[in-house]
Amino acid sequence: MPRHVLSHPLVNARLSNLRLATTSAKDFREGIHDISFILGVEASRDLEEQTFDGQTPIGPFTGSIIKPRIGLTPILRAGLGMTDALLTLFPAAPVYHLGLFREKVSLQPVEYYSKLPSVPNVDICFLLDPLVATGGTAYAALTMLLDWGIPLNRIKLLVVLGSESGLRYIESSYPGLEIWVAAVDPSITHDGLISPGLGDTGDRLFHTTRE
């Protein structure tokens, strides 16, 4: 099944803390980091390994390394909150920032920045988007990666919280896409926010919430 929803007590507890309006920016950042780390571990289960012969202080052994070249593509700016966790798992991975924002009236994504090189130099992309509400921003980022030349079956979308309608929109648009999400909420508000959700993830991550 392309959509994988985590079911883990540690994830549930951290997500519950993220939902609280009283959670500080520091604790919010740490919670996003922790959940992203677990998402990255789970989404990496099927990565191909390559073996090598090594030597411990005691004797020889057969070791392994991750064979595919991994790239990280966080969607600015909230995706930055997930990046360090994935770099912990893949410290040599290049990070290709994608700048997209959602226009407030139409709720349509607008591209303003792309750090993708002219041709792909990675085998698998982890697309990092903490919140999938309407699905429009993730859809636009996926289109950018596909146009860049990464096949759909080599993209993994990692999401901290998604709405059911937003995830279904992405799944219907790109059948077969591998999605890893920590939790799914049932609905979105009229202005495109996940309900009950987390609020504006970018503002809460970077402590720019306006009264």
Image (tube, rainbow, N blue to C red):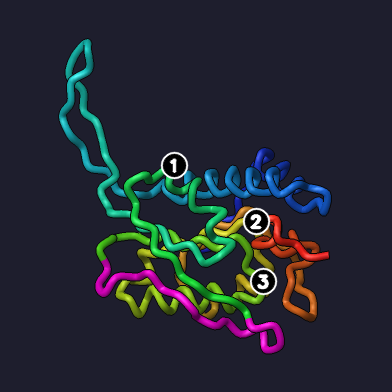
Q: What amino acid is labelled 1 in the image?
A: Thr
Residue identifier under label 1? 88
Q: What amino acid is labelled 3 in the image?
A: Ala
Q: Residue at x 34, y 52 (%)?
A: 93
Q: Residues within 10 Å of mark 3 (few under 14, many from 20)?
A: many
Residue 122: within the magenta?
A: no
Q: Name the quadrant containing residue 51.
A: top left
Residue identifier under label 3? 133
Residue identifier under label 2? 206
Quadrant (top left/top right/bottom left/bottom right) for the C terminus? bottom right
Q: Position of residue 122 (x, y in %)?
A: 28, 61
Q: Residue furthest bottom?
A: 106
Q: Main secondary structure of the magenta part?
A: loop
Q: Position of residue 126 (x, y in %)?
A: 43, 59
Q: Name the quadrant containing residue 57.
A: top left
Please give the range of residues in magenta.
103-120
Q: Residue at x 75, y 73 (%)?
A: 188
Q: What amino acid is labelled 2 in the image?
A: Phe
Q: Residues within 10 Å of mark 2 (few under 14, many from 20)?
A: some
